[in-house]
Structure formats: structure tokens, C-alpha cells
Image (cartoon, rainbow, N blue to C red):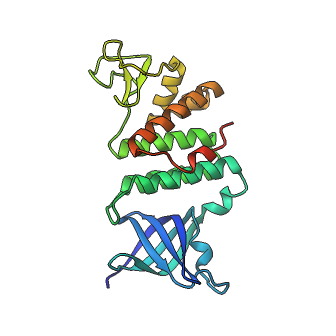
């Protein structure tokens, strides 16, 4: 069995037997992989604490047919310890981990952009650079864009007519002009549309200066857009603390 080493973020863990765990990792070079970490639930384990969700690790594994086997783990950053004392940041981070797993459906399929985005998003949460919900919504929009579902917040998503436009259609893929507007389209405020564009592009001065009402409206649209493309919502998203 080939041995390999990679950087990774721990997305999820599951109990296996009496002392083992199955660890789901998003790695830099190999995308999402699952590995068995043997004996990590024993109190004598030296690596168990390094394989918790949010952990940024340097990990060595043997490649198996369905599950790899974890052999060594070195900690790069323990984000879980930093986030666990702050409920808004913890729940936002949990939604980010679940999104990263859902948007990398094929195991061992390289997903470097998703990995880099997740590392950057978690670091921003730990540093408390911005409101947790703004970081989360920006992460969700950018993750969808990497997956090939980038929404349009300027030109019409159907015909390309230059904006700004006020109607927003989730099935169409963003804002739509009056001629293309389908029934049931949302009509968010102009500042909300601007905020969504800022979150996608990384215009943090504009995003940080937005009003709470605009942030809540933007979050609702982002959640609906994500659910449309994933075909079902995230289990962790309803738990996010919307201030």
C-alpha cells in the first residue's frame, strides 16, 4: 500500500469499534479522503486530540481500497480550541466544514481551491476579522463559485443585460432584468445586492459597513441559493447564530 503525506483540515469524525475513529479530511493534494485512526479514542493516544474537527494537520496515511489508514499526525493549528468558546464563530465554522464536505463529492479528487478557501475562512474566523455570518456567507458564495455555480449580482444571469437589476432568481442563477424575470423572483434591496457582490468579490470595507437588515436578507438568499444547488440544506446552517 502506498504511503503519502499531506496537509489537511479535519472535517468530521465517526466512531469505529471500541477505540478507533473514521476521520474525514480535506487535503491539499488529494481532495477529500477518509482514513481510519486506530486507537485514538484511548486515553493513552497521543494523536487523538489532533484529529478533531477544525484541526489543521500534517498527516501521513497508507492508501487503502476504500479507507486509508492514519499513521502519523502533526498539528499545524488547533482551530477548534480557538472557536469552541464562541458560539457564533463555532456554528459558522461548523457550516463551513459541512459545506466543504458536500462540495467535494468525489473522494481523492484534487480540490486545491476548496482546501485553500477553507483554510483561509477558518483563519479569518479565529482572528475575528469580520462578523462570523459575513465570513460564512462569503465562504459559501465562493465555494459555490469554485464548484461552478457562481451567482451573478450585476449583469442579468439569463441574457447578460448590464445591471444593476433588482430581481433575484435562484434557479436562473442571480439577478435578472425585467424582461427575463421569472415568476416568484425575490426583490432584495439594492444595498443587499451590493453586499452579496462584495461578499463574493472580497470587498470587505463594503461588507463590514453593511446594516444588520441587509446582512440578514443576504444570508437568506445565500442559504436558499446553496440549498438549490445541493438539493437539500445543510444540517448545521439553522444553528448559525444570526445576530
Q: Measured from the top left, where is residue 78 in percent x and y?
A: 61, 65
Res 126 seen here: yes
Seen in the picture, residue 176 relative to 37 is either above or below; the reply is above
- Where is residue 7, by image quadrant? bottom left
Total labels: the figure holds 0
Q: Measured from the top left, where is residue 222 in percent x and y?
A: 49, 35
Tell which residue pokes out farthest to the right in this image: 85
- Where is residue 133, by image quadrant? top right
Seen in the picture, residue 156 relative to 237 is either above or below; the reply is above
Q: Is 195 on the left or on the right of 88, as rendered?
A: left
Q: Which quarter of the rendered picture does the N terminus lie within?
A: bottom left
Q: Residue at x 63, y 47 (%)?
A: 239
Q: Is 113 on the left or on the right of 43, as rendered?
A: left
Q: Is 147 on the left or on the right of 186, as rendered?
A: left
Tell which residue pokes out farthest to the top in this image: 178
Q: Which quarter of the rendered picture does the C terminus lie within?
A: top right
- Where is residue 94, by image quadrant? bottom right
Taking depth in this image into account, of 107 and 212 the one nearest to the observer is: 107
Q: Measured from the top left, where is residue 59 in percent x and y?
A: 47, 74
Res 202 seen here: no
Q: Residue at x 43, y 42 (%)?
A: 142
Q: Measured from the top left, where is residue 111 in percent x and y?
A: 35, 57
Tell which residue pokes out farthest to the left in this image: 159
Seen in the picture, residue 67 relative to 29 is either above or below; the reply is below
Q: Is 49 on the left or on the right of 169, as rendered?
A: right
Amino acid at each position: 500500500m502506498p504511503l503519502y503525506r499531506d496537509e489537511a483540515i479535519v472535517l468530521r469524525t465517526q466512531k469505529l469499534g471500541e477505540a478507533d475513529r473514521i476521520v474525514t479530511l480535506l487535503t491539499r493534494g488529494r481532495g477529500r479522503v477518509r482514513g481510519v485512526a486506530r486507537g485514538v479514542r484511548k486515553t493513552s493516544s497521543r494523536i487523538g486530540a489532533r484529529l478533531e474537527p477544525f484541526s489543521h494537520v500534517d498527516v501521513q496515511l497508507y492508501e487503502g481500497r476504500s479507507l486509508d489508514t492514519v499513521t502519523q499526525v502533526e498539528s499545524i493549528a488547533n482551530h477548534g480550541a480557538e472557536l469552541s468558546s464562541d458560539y457564533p464563530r463555532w456554528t459558522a465554522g461548523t457550516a463551513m466544514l459541512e459545506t466543504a464536505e458536500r462540495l467535494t463529492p468525489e473522494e481523492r479528487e484534487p480540490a486545491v481551491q476548496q482546501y485553500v478557501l477553507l483554510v483561509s475562512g477558518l483563519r479569518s474566523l479565529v482572528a475575528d476579522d469580520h462578523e462570523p455570518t459575513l465570513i460564512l456567507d462569503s465562504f459559501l458564495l465562493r465555494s459555490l463559485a469554485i464548484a461552478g455555480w457562481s451567482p451573478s449580482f450585476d449583469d442579468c444571469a439569463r441574457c447578460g443585460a448590464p445591471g444593476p437589476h433588482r430581481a433575484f432568481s435562484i434557479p436562473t442563477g442571480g439577478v435578472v432584468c425585467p424582461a427575463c424575470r421569472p415568476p416568484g423572483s425575490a426583490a432584495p434591496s439594492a444595498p443587499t445586492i451590493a453586499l452579496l457582490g462584495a461578499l463574493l468579490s472580497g470587498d470587505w470595507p463594503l461588507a463590514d459597513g453593511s446594516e444588520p437588515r441587509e446582512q440578514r436578507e443576504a444570508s437568506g438568499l445565500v442559504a436558499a441559493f446553496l440549498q438549490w444547488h445541493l438539493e437539500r440544506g445543510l444540517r448545521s446552517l439553522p444553528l448559525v447564530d444570526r445576530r
